[in-house]
Amino acid sequence: MKKSVICTVFGTVLVLSGCAEKKAATPEEIWKGYCTSIGNAARSITLDRQNGITKKEALDYANKVTDPTTKGFVLDYLERIYAVSDAELKADKDAVQIKFKQQAYEQCLNTPHDPKKMPDYKPF
């Protein structure tokens, strides 16, 4: 009887600890997540360019972004990606996408930011 009560109590404690709230993310973790989204956005811009989306269409869409930090990154990578030749974009599509994704991620991580004023974004 005592074993079953102890097992029940122990099991309840395990279940409840699993349901506990996640700890709040640190500003560094939030910034890293944001930078991951920026890298994914750069990859998507590259993919759009490879699939024939015009620069005007991409700019029209990018200009709808309301957060100034995000808009800056997106417009910067839009210019970089549309400056690349079609031949280079199509030579190895996946490699080019990965290259821009990684560059954007690293540039974002190395950008000074205010931990008290994080960009307003939706994970991408």
Image (tube, rainbow, N blue to C red):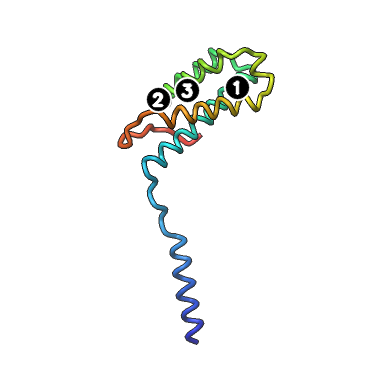
Confirm or deny contact between disc 1 and disc 2 (CB under 8 A). Answer: no
The circle drawn on residue 48 is 1
Image coordinates for residue 109, horizontal then vertical, percent: 43, 32
Image coordinates for residue 43, horizontal then vertical, percent: 57, 27
The residue type indicated by label 1 comes to Asp
The residue positioned farthest toward the bottom in the image shown: 1
Q: Residue at x 48, y 20 (%)?
A: 62
Image coordinates for residue 121, horizontal then vertical, percent: 43, 33
Q: Secondary structure at mark 1?
A: helix
The residue type indicated by label 3 comes to Val
Is residue 115 depicted above or below 19 in this figure?
A: above
Q: Which residue is mark 3?
A: 74
The residue type indicated by label 2 comes to Thr
Q: Which residue is mark 2?
A: 66
In three-dimensional space, the C-alpha distance between marks 3 and 1, rounded to whole angstroms, equals 13 Å
In three-dimensional space, the C-alpha distance between marks 1 and 2, rounded to whole angstroms, equals 21 Å
The circle drawn on residue 28 is none
In three-dimensional space, the C-alpha distance between marks 2 and 3, rounded to whole angstroms, equals 11 Å
Q: Nearer the viewer, mark 2 or mark 3?
A: 3
Q: Quadrant of residue 44?
A: top right
- Residue closest to the eye, 2 or 93: 93
- Residue closest to the eye, 19 or 108: 108
